[in-house]
Amino acid sequence: MGHQYQAVQWNKNKIVYDVYVLVAIAVFIGVFVFVGLQPHPSGHNADPVVLLIRALGVTAFAMLTVILTIGPLARISQRFRPMLYNRRHLGVITFFVSAAHFGLALLWYHGGGPLNPFISLFFSNPLYDSIPGFPFEVLGLGALLILFVMAATSHDFWLNNLSAPVWKALHMLVYPAYMLLVFHVVLGALMTEKSIFYPILTALTFLGVSGLHVATGLREWRADSGMKSLKTKGWIDVCAPGDIPEKRAVIAPLPKGDRVAVFRYDGKISAVTNACRHQNGPLGEGRVVDGCITCPWHGWQYRPEDGVSPPPFTEKISTYNVKIEDGRVMLDPKPNKPGERAEPAIIPQGAAS
Amino acid sequence: MKRPHRRFHLIIWMLIAPFTLLAGLYFWTQRPMTPYSQLPASIAPVEQGDR
């Protein structure tokens, strides 16, 4: 939480995670280069530097693919939620792998001539109006610049100063970056690839990522419109108290598109906004731990009654008034100010089962 | 508080996915059909002893 800024919020979990990722990258690149150096029946021997450039590029593309699947997978199944915790670390490492791929390619292909390598990158191949001869490197550079912006602003310092909506919007640039990378691969490596295997693999990879995002997006859209008709006298009929699992929540969509997390805990019902102050994580998919609503993404906590983080933290989220009427949990769609106490509804005896 | 961009994610992917797939497929069909072994003579590998 935002109690204080630290240069990098490392902990043992993150260090172990980073070590695993770096070892996996080293092993993958080592195997890639080793296999590529084996004698080929055609007698053509691959250059180790070119193999290393390709290995770094494949690694970066694969890592970005994995990163882009984490979000929708975590929405489909709770089993994938732990992957969200270190997603930003994976993103920053992906930037460094991409930068290594770019730097090595720039030196190898553009560093030996009289021109500045960067000028050579843009002008040595002027076939911008050609498809098979298009200078695909500039597409990769475009994606790299986006990854740089994302890596540079990945720290919570920027998240706090830009605000979560702006930060999220900025980091959604990863989608066009991925599109640029697909074109970079298609117009680059696949242009001279004789095997059909790699184009199919690339297409299936992209189909998988985009299919996951579209499927989860449609599911969210349907969930938003599912409960809008259950409105009574300004209050919204959410569900019966027994429909909410103990120390968990149901998420109630409001007519204007907001969502409210309605929690049941210790015989009471409280409601807060579904958006965590940190990264707008879905609080309603979290649970009550040590008396506090705990975000499933990064563990930020809030008291259910007033939406205030426990000391020494100071974050506040909006609360909503709730009541139980005729055995139903009713929600006032008008939010209270962030941090304003809303009296929890007491669940009558026998109503929670 | 409204969780921003929820539908925006979907809209972006609804635009990006078909465009990337169709454009990528079109680009790929435009690839040169000449494998490395059939490079034009002007850029063919120079045999040893030619100079």
Image: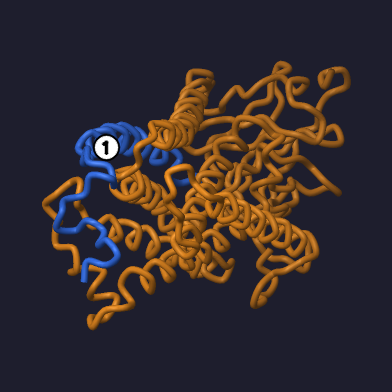
The reply to whether residue A40 is in sight is yes
Q: Picture quarter containing residue A115?
A: bottom left
| Letter of the chain in orange | A
- Neighbour class for label 1 at 10 Å: few (<14), some, many (≥20)? many
What residue appears at the point 27 percent right and 55 percent down from the top-left corner?
A: A136
Instruction: Identify the image's colour scheme: rainbow, by chain, secondary structure or one colour.
Output: by chain
Chain letter of the residue carrying label 1: B
Q: Which residue is mark 1?
A: B28
Seen in the picture, residue A11 relative to A350 is either above or below; the reply is below
Specify the colour of chain B: blue
* Quadrant of the drawing holding the N terminus of chain A: bottom right
Q: Position of residue A124 (x, y in %)?
A: 19, 68
Please give the name of the residue rendered at 72% of the width and 69% of the height, measured from the top-left corner: A10
Question: Dot 1: what SS?
Answer: helix
Residue B27: x and y in percent read 23, 39
Image quadrant holding the C terminus of chain A, namely top right
- Residue A265, relative to residue A278: is it above or below? above
